[in-house]
Image (spheres, rainbow, N blue to C red):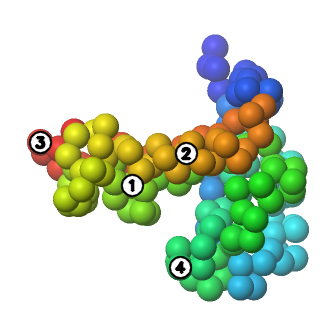
Amino acid sequence: MSQLFTPITLRNFTLDNRIVVPLLCQYSSDDGIALDWHAQHLPALAISGAGLVVVEMTNVEPIGRITPWCARLWNDATRWVARAGFDSCGMHGAHGYLLSSFFSPLSNQRENESSGSIENRMRFPVEVFRAMREAWPVDKPLGVRLSCVDWVDGIP
């Protein structure tokens, strides 16, 4: 039997099943503020039966937005999410976003302590994760989204 429909516990948070609706950029905010669209869209996903619904990519600084319509929470950010009642939080380190540029030996062309070995390349992303872990409630899960393959021969 597949594990897909069985519960899984992450810290003190139990999902009814292992079906996850991934983050979907909606570009439907007004200068980053959620609108009626979000109040209808997210609950519809929540009642779909999936064990976890991941809210769209949300920016912690204005400069990181893809568009002016991207979601934001840069005022008292990582703690606002916990106060809003979210059960988990994630760090986006994939798809060419800033943190992914540290992981990859292909894109990491820095000439400082954050380049070279995998330990060096992971230094800043791990520092960011530790800061998030410090701000996020210890009983709630904190995840990381990664791009793990550069799809280039000879680059692990």
The kind of residue on which mark 3 rests is Gly
Q: Nearer the viewer, residue 44 or 1?
A: 44
User: Which residue is rendered at x = 81% and y = 65% of the image?
Assistant: 41
Question: Which residue has dot 1 on it?
Answer: 100
Mark 3 or 2: in front is 2
Give the Cα separation between the discs numbered 3 and 2.
28 Å
Give the Cα separation between the discs numbered 3 and 4.
34 Å
Are the residues tagged 1 and 2 within 8 Å (C-beta)?
no
Tell me which numbered mark, 4 or 1, is placed earlier along the sequence. 4
Tell me which numbered mark, 1 or 2, is placed earlier along the sequence. 1
Indicate the position of residue 110 as horizontal and vertical percent values.
Answer: 23, 60
Mark 1 or 2: in front is 2
Q: Nearer the viewer, residue 146 or 17?
A: 146
Mark 3 or 4: in front is 4
Question: Which residue has dot 2 on it?
Answer: 129
Residue that lies at the very extreme toward the front in this rendered image: 113
